[in-house]
Image: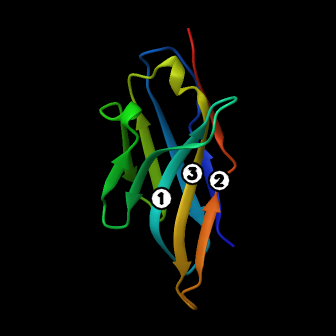
Amino acid sequence: QVQLVESGGGLVQPGGSLRLSCAASGSGLSINTMTWYRQAPGKQRELVATITSGGSTNYVDSVKGRFAISRGNAKNTVDLQMNSLKPEDTAVYYCNADGYYNYDRMRFVSWGQGTQVTVSS
């Protein structure tokens, strides 16, 4: 079973920065895509940024130019650098991994438990 563990959330003032990290545990994995989602109170979960195994990235329009997703130094990790944070970025941020097990090519989709990001003065 693939487990995802997020870290790096917290309270920051508007205009500040935070870096989120996500690590996938488990052996014999091949991860195709890692994605950050967020869900604000009373709103639907939305895709924030995604990165493929080849390094292609995609962002929701509201974070373009401010957020950057990247593969971490360790295998099966992903980071989200968030700059120029705004109050509307306040949400629980979730990590998602989509891949397959090497031994049987069975697909998996896993979610982390979420980390709170609060942008407030």
Label 1 crowd (10 A; few <14 / some 14-19 / many >=20): many
Task: Indicate which disc, 3 or 2, sits on the residue closer to the N terminus.
Answer: 3
Pick the quarter of the image with the C terminus.
top right
Q: Residue at x 60, y 67 (%)?
A: 109
How far is the residue under mark 3 from the one under mark 1?
7 Å
Task: Indicate which disc, 3 or 1, sits on the residue closer to the N terminus.
Answer: 1
Pick the quarter of the image with the N terminus.
bottom right
Question: Helix or strand or loop: what does disc 3 sit on?
Answer: strand
Q: Residue at x 39, y 56 (%)?
A: 51
Image location of residue 18, percent across then percent down = 47, 30
Question: Helix or strand or loop: what does disc 2 sit on?
Answer: loop
Query: What is the quadrant of residue 96 in the picture?
Result: bottom right
Q: Which residue is mark 2?
A: 112
How far is the residue under mark 3 from the one under mark 2?
5 Å
Query: What is the quadrant of residue 64 in the picture?
Result: top left
Q: Residue at x 40, y 31 (%)?
A: 62
User: Disc 2 marks which amino acid?
Assistant: Gly
Image location of residue 111, percent across then percent down = 64, 57
User: Disc 1 marks which amino acid?
Assistant: Met
Q: Which residue is mark 3?
A: 95
Q: Which residue is mark 1?
A: 34
Q: Residue at x 49, y 53 (%)?
A: 35
